[in-house]
Structure formats: C-alpha cells, structure tokens
Amino acid sequence: MLPIGARPGADDAAGGCGAGCGCGDAHDDAFDPMECGLDPDLAELLAAAGLDPVQVEDIAHLAVEEDLDNGVDVTTVATVPEDAVATGDFTARTAGTVAGLHIAEAVLSVVCTAEFEVERHVEDGDTVRPGQVLLSVTSRTRDLLTAERSALNLLCRLSGIATLTRAWADALAGTAARVRDTRKTTPGLRALEKYAVRCGGGVNHRMSLSDAALVKDNHVIAAGGVAEAFRAVRAEFPGVPIEVEVDRVDQIEPVIAEGADLILLDNFTPEQAAEAVRLVAGRATLEASGSLTLETAPAYAATGVDYLAVGALTHSAPVLDIGLDLRPAGSGTGDRGRHG
C-alpha cells in the first residue's frame, strides 16, 4: 500500500510514528505506517470496551486498503495542499445512539501520517441529537479526507445497530426481559456489531459456534429427536451450555428432563409463550424468537420470558446518519486525546 498522500512511484515513505507507537523505533526507511500498532491509550480504551485492539486494527486496515485499492486518494492529493491542517467534526445528522467512536479513531490511526489530536464530546452508548458533534479530530487535511468514508462506514453502521437495539430495550422497559442478538452478523464484523448491541442496551448471545450449543430443527432431524439431540451434545461436550429450539409446547418437558440450560421458543405466540413459562416454572431460561416486532415486544415480555432474540438488530438495522464537517484547525472543549 502506498503511503497516504504519496503519488504512485514516489520514493518518500510517510512518517507519523510517535513515542507511543506500537512499532517502536525499530523500523527502517522502508517502514509502512499502515503496519504500525494502535496508540496504547486507544488500545486500552478498546480493550476496556470488550474489543480486541488487534482485531479492530485489522478491520481498520482492511477498510482503508479496500478504499485505496493499492493507490492513493487521487481527488484529495490533487486538491489539498500537502501541509494543510484542519479539524474534522464527526456530527450526527439524525438522533440516535452512538457506537464505534474509538473504532473510527482506529481508522484514523492507520491513515494519519503525523500525530493527530482528538476531542471526544460523547461516549459510545450516549443518545445524540441532530447537529451534535460527537468527535473532533485535528490532523493533516489529506489524512482526514482519506480516512473519512472508512471511518464513517463503521461508525454509521455500528451506531445504527445501537440505535435499533435501544428502541427494543426501551420497548421492554419495566419488564424482566432483555433483547438479545443472534449470529446474523456481517462477516468479519461480528465482534464490533455485537459491541454495538451492548451499547444500545442489548445482550449478546453466543459469539461463535464453539462457545455454546444451539440445537435447532436440522440438528433434531439428524439426531432423531429433540431429546436425542440434546443428549448427543451433552455427551460430546459436557461443559458447554446448551440451548434447545422447540416449536411446540409438548417438546418442552422432555428437554427440561434432560437438563437443558435454555429453551428457544421458535415462533410461539404470546399465549403459547405464556403457557411455556408456566410449564417451565423457572427450571430453565426461556427465549422467544421468530416474527418478533417492536409492536409485539411488550406482549412477549409480559409473558415472563427472559430474552427476545432479534436477528434484525444486526442484519437489518439502518445506519445512523453521521457526517464529517471540516473547519480550520482550532481548539474545542471535549475530552482531549492524542495519537501518534
């Protein structure tokens, strides 16, 4: 990948590594700034949010490399002086719940060829209004414009998921039920999208096929029955939590007898879900799934189920409209940070 702002065939490598750079001082003249680790302070913030900083950096690299396609931002290189500096304000165009601000910073970190300064005006999980500035970044203007779309793609996507999740969480307010995501996520972005669900007040289901078992209809067919499928998983993986999907009330008692940890009520009506709650009587956790809507969510929550599984949180959330507005470099009033 060419250094940001360089022309094809240029020999000068871009700089920008500061004292906190993950690559240290060991690189030589051939060092590619896109291989440099994230600023340690930013990495700590990501880790505190339950995210793997290395994975976030990898995603940021992929996003930027896809946008540059082994070239440069030809429009920006042609129109913006190399030494120009500006402040870019990430600004909400519509109301919603924000998620992914530090991930946007990570994108800037892999693009910016010099130290840049950030002002954090809000935090992930905050409700924002139209026109509200979320994050301000002061850096080379070329770098800001080159990073703009990649940073916004992730920030808008994750904030859209958080916003939709917040609507579901609000619909369940006053009940014991929680909204929970599924594995219907964008390939490569699962950890980030499930983080956005948490920012919106939701709960994560299993992160992968390996950390919990979910016995569904095809497993039941292959095993010869619901109870048989449960026993097969328990025998092969005795320490793994097991959730079993049922689509009829009469399937519940055999699964309870086997010792299921959690039962997924597939396409139950609220009346059927209430019957299941009475039958289970606290012996297992219950999750309603299938054909759920924001309008019907309170009725399902009122039955006493523990979770509502909503794949739409990640597969159908509209993006939250956020833009980047440039202004002359200057000071602000947010929580300041500096990246090298």
Image: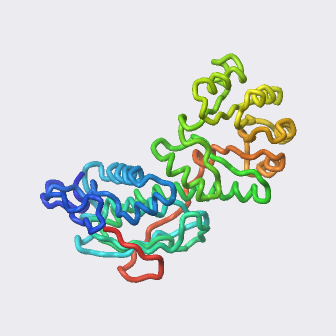
The colour scheme applied to this rendered structure is rainbow
Which of the pair 290/219 is nearer the observer? 219
Residue located at (83% from left, 46% from top): 303
Residue located at (66% from left, 19% from top): 221
Residue 88 spot, x, y in % from top left = 40, 72
Q: Is residue 31 above or below residue 89?
A: above
Q: Is residue 298 above or below residue 117?
A: above
Left or right: where 55 falls relative to 216: left
Which of the 4 image quadrants contains residue 37? bottom left
Q: Is residue 326 above or below residue 179?
A: below
Which of the pair 117/226 is nearer the observer? 226
Left or right: where 310 falls relative to 121: right
Residue 180 spot, x, y in % from top left = 66, 47
Please count the marks in the image.
0
Residue 155 spot, x, y in % from top left = 48, 59
Please state, as top left, top right, bottom left or bottom right, where the C terminus lies in the image. bottom left
Residue 173 spot, x, y in % from top left = 76, 59
Residue located at (63% from left, 43% from top): 311
